[in-house]
Amino acid sequence: MKIVFFNAALVGAGGFIGAIFRYGLSGFVQRSSAFAAFPYGTLAVNMLGCLLIGITVGIIDARQMINPELRSFVLVGVLGGFTTYSTFGLETFALLREADFLRAASNIAIHVILGLALVWLGYALASR
């Protein structure tokens, strides 16, 4: 039970760090953008998160040099707090690497279409 709380604290601390970086970078990019009507800040965070999770998992897989606690801190905590979009990208990439193209395409379609539909539903319910 002690290990579970320790790991949860590691993920929480990492999430705090990731969320602070997301807030800072997204705001900076958005304020710096000449075309502020487009969400460049979110785009920058999501794309950087995908690059960072790819680099991190690539290093972990190639070198096997990170323990499970540090992996949780970095991948679930820091990068998860920075953007969960990177996890979506990594999971879709894993399906593609396994040549599971139908599941990869389904994952993309479901996340995008169902996600937008649920935003619409939530907004509709809340704004009544």
Image (cartoon, helix red, strand yellow):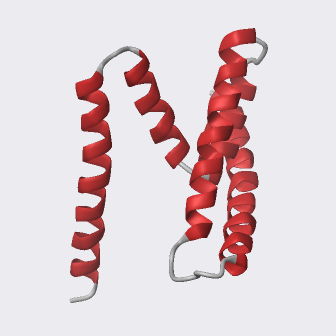
Q: In the picture provided, is 75 more to the left or to the right than 28?
A: left
Which residue is most to the front? 34
- Residue located at (53% from left, 72% from top): 39
Residue 121 or residue 103, whichever sits in front: 103
Residue 72 or residue 41, whichever sits in front: 41
User: Residue 80, percent across and down?
Assistant: 60, 45
Up-down relation of residue 27 to residue 69 (above or below): below
Up-down relation of residue 18 to residue 118 (above or below): above
Up-down relation of residue 89 to residue 127 (above or below): above
User: Residue 62, percent across and down?
Assistant: 70, 11
User: How many dots with numbers?
Assistant: 0
Residue 21 position by quadrant: bottom right
Up-down relation of residue 13 to residue 90 (above or below): below
- Residue located at (23% from left, 26% from top): 102
Q: From this viewpoint, is residue 107 visible?
A: yes
Q: From this viewpoint, is residue 2 visible?
A: no
Q: Which quadrant of the figure contains the N terminus?
A: top right
Q: Which quadrant of the figure contains the C terminus?
A: bottom left
Residue 75 position by quadrant: top right
Which residue is most to the bottom? 128
Q: In the picture provided, is 7 more to the left or to the right than 47?
A: right
User: Residue 10, percent across and down?
Assistant: 73, 39
Residue 120 or residue 7, whichever sits in front: 120
- Residue located at (74% from left, 17% from top): 67
- Residue located at (59% from left, 50% from top): 47
Residue 54 or residue 77, whichever sits in front: 54
User: Residue 2, percent across and down?
Assistant: 69, 28
